[in-house]
């Protein structure tokens, strides 16, 4: 496994991270998968208080009890479940962030979270207030660093200007190259780590039947998946090609893969040892489909 520094932080995280949201099955099997991931070299595990109404954090906390010093734990805040459980509302206010951390710490069975992320964001948010909350949590030792999870360039730009974020989690894949236009270069320029999720585009790039995705038609999705298959083979399968496309971007610190099974874990763990995509292969993948761009939430020219 390869490890990279996350932005300006002291955290060294695995090139392939573990997106824990996908762990919704048997608890014992999920725990085994988490243990195998750690044994295989993955040290970055991402969860959120939103996932399964906190049960996902509880699962991760139990799995790594007694192994806390071996893992980099990331969680998220900002989506508040309604009292009747019917859904959640966006709440980025300072008091909510400061109160929510207590539940996450308890569920994760830890005194601190390595990376605490705002789980979304808009320009209408009380951004400075949210930043105050994260900075206070750092001072209190309850978190080591903070970041945001966002696909909105305009929001990302504001947080870069106004805060001490060390990372941005964003969706990025061959079928979602929107970050290439404005955000990846900007984050690289400011030495802010990129945690890329969605590398296999809901499985559409590897094994799922084609369907429309974002602004792409079913035919275009099929074309991109065919290009992935064309540069894959015995030494690197389609999943590993899709992950390689993401991690080989110089701005990306880690590809956070949603892993549900031991088979998926094995594919992910073997990715760093597979042959890198050549310039010719990268060009072939990029040429297979027209790059998309954000239509909303753009950074003003």
Image: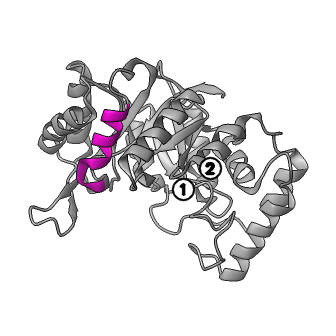
Q: Earlier in the sequence, mark 2 or mark 1?
A: 2
Name the residue tied to disc 1: 301
Q: Position of residue 242 (x, y in %)?
A: 70, 53
Q: In the figure, residue 160 lies in which quadrant? A: top left
Q: Position of residue 49 (x, y in %)?
A: 27, 47
Left or right side of 199 for 18: left
114 vs 109, nearest the viewer:
109
Can you name the residue that lies furthest to the left here? Answer: 83
Mark 2–mark 1 distance (CA, rounded to whole Å) = 45 Å
Name the residue tied to disc 2: 263
10 Å crowding of disc 2: few (<14), some (14-19), many (20+): few
Can residue 39 be seen here? yes
Q: In the figure, residue 61 lies in which quadrant? A: top left
Q: Which residues are magenta?
A: 52-63
Numbered tag placed on residue 276 in the rendering: none
Q: Position of residue 218 (x, y in %)?
A: 66, 81
Q: In the figure, residue 132 lies in which quadrant? A: top left
Secondary structure of the residue carrying numbered label 2: helix
Left or right side of 180 for 96: left
């Amino acid at each position: 496994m390869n490890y990279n520094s996350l932005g300006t932080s002291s955290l060294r995280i695995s090139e392939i991270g573990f997106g824990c949201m996908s762990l919704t099955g048997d608890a014992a099997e999920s725990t085994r998968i988490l243990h195998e991931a750690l044994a295989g070299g993955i040290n970055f595990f991402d969860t959120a208080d939103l996932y399964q109404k906190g049960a996902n954090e509880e699962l991760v906390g139990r799995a790594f009890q007694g192994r806390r010093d071996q893992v980099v734990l990331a969680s998220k805040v900002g989506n508040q479940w309604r009292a009747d459980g019917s859904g959640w509302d966006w709440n980025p206010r300072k008091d909510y962030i400061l109160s929510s951390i207590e539940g996450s710490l308890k569920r994760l069975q830890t005194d601190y979270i390595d990376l605490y992320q705002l789980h979304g964001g808009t320009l209408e948010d009380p951004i400075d207030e949210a930043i105050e909350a994260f900075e206070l949590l750092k001072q209190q030792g309850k978190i080591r660093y903070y970041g945001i999870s966002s696909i909105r360039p305009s929001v990302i730009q504001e947080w870069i200007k106004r805060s001490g974020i060390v990372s941005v989690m964003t969706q990025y894949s061959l079928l979602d190259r929107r970050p290439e236009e404005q955000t990846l270069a900007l984050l690289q320029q400011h030495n802010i780590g990129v945690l890329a999720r969605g590398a296999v585009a809901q499985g559409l790039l590897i094994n799922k039947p084609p369907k429309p995705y974002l602004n792409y038609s079913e035919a275009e999705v099929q074309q991109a998946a065919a290009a992935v298959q064309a540069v894959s083979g015995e030494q690197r399968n389609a999943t590993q090609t899709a992950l390689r496309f993401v991690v080989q971007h110089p701005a990306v610190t880690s590809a956070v893969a949603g892993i549900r099974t031991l088979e998926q874990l094995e594919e992910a763990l073997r990715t760093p040892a597979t042959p890198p995509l050549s310039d010719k292969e990268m060009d072939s993948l990029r040429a297979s489909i027209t790059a998309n761009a954000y239509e909303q939430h753009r950074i003003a020219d």
